[in-house]
Amino acid sequence: MGDPDQSHQTNPPVMPGDDVAHVPQWVKREDARSRVDDRASTAHGIGLVMRLAVPLVALAIAAIGQALAATPVLAQQVSQPAAQSWETRLRGLDADEAAALIDQLKQAQDGLRRGDTLHFDLLAGAPASYPMTMTSPREAFLSVDFSHPFTVERVSPADSPRKTYRMAVLPNGVGALYWDVRVVPGFNGTLERVEMVYRAPAPF
């Protein structure tokens, strides 16, 4: 029989301590090929991780954006009144006087939005820890819908030449934070002062 096929010969293993100079060439080639395969495997793994990570990061950013957009801001809540479910309660005045007062406030809002020069005093605030304290009086005033207050009351005596009114505006519905508004017209009938306090409802 002839010599066996060289490709099927069993080559002796390289033992620790063997002189590298005497390591057969086929071992060196196998070692180099193994290193190339390891590098290719590592690169493939990194590429796979990156392909998986990019969509996950994009999804996380989108989720954070949606969460921030959905976070309720107090001033935004005020500008979106709750659905009306009550009849306005009048105290010390009739429906026509209440309607004239409401119309006067709405005209003042329209004038400020147009950039008209208006000289009435405008104050707005809230308890110190409420986020509403970070909203300017002008922004707060323009955010309120005066169309359908919960109550309108004339607090000055009927025979007083100087009228003073108070109204409760419930932008978030009954039992939630509301605007306590005090309105003081001047002697000529124009607005002289508007005071607004964003407060919690009475516990009774």
Image (tube, helix red, strand yellow):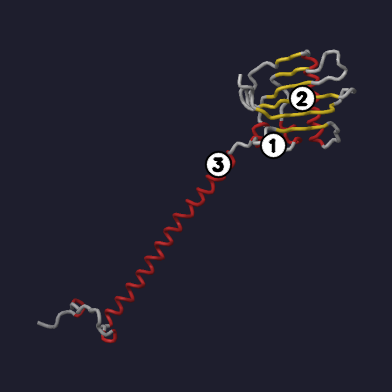
* Most foreground residue, 97 or 24: 97
Element assignment for label 2:
strand
Q: Give percent across and percent down for residue 37.
A: 35, 69
- The single residue placed furthest to the front in the displayed view is 128
**Which residue appears at 51% of the width and 51% of the height?**
58
Task: Specify which label sits upstream in the sequence, 2 or 3.
Answer: 3
* Most foreground residue, 32 or 61: 61
Q: Which residue is mark 3?
A: 67
- Kindly report which numbered mark, 1 or 3, lies closer to the viewer in this rendering: 1
**Which residue appears at 86% of the width and 33% of the height?**
119
Q: Give percent across and percent down for residue 74.
A: 64, 35
Q: Which residue is mark 2?
A: 182
Q: Which residue is mark 1?
A: 133
* Distance between mark 1 and mark 2 Cα atoms: 18 Å
- Displayed quadrant of residue 148: top right
Q: Are there few (<14), some (14-19), or many (20+) residues within 10 Å of tag 2?
A: many
- Displayed quadrant of residue 68: top right
Element assignment for label 3:
helix
Residue 29 left/right relative to 121: left
Amino acid at dot 2: Arg
- The quadrant of the rendering that contains the N terminus is bottom left
Element assignment for label 1:
helix
Residue 47 - label? none
Q: Are marks 2 and 3 in contact (CB under 8 Å)?
A: no
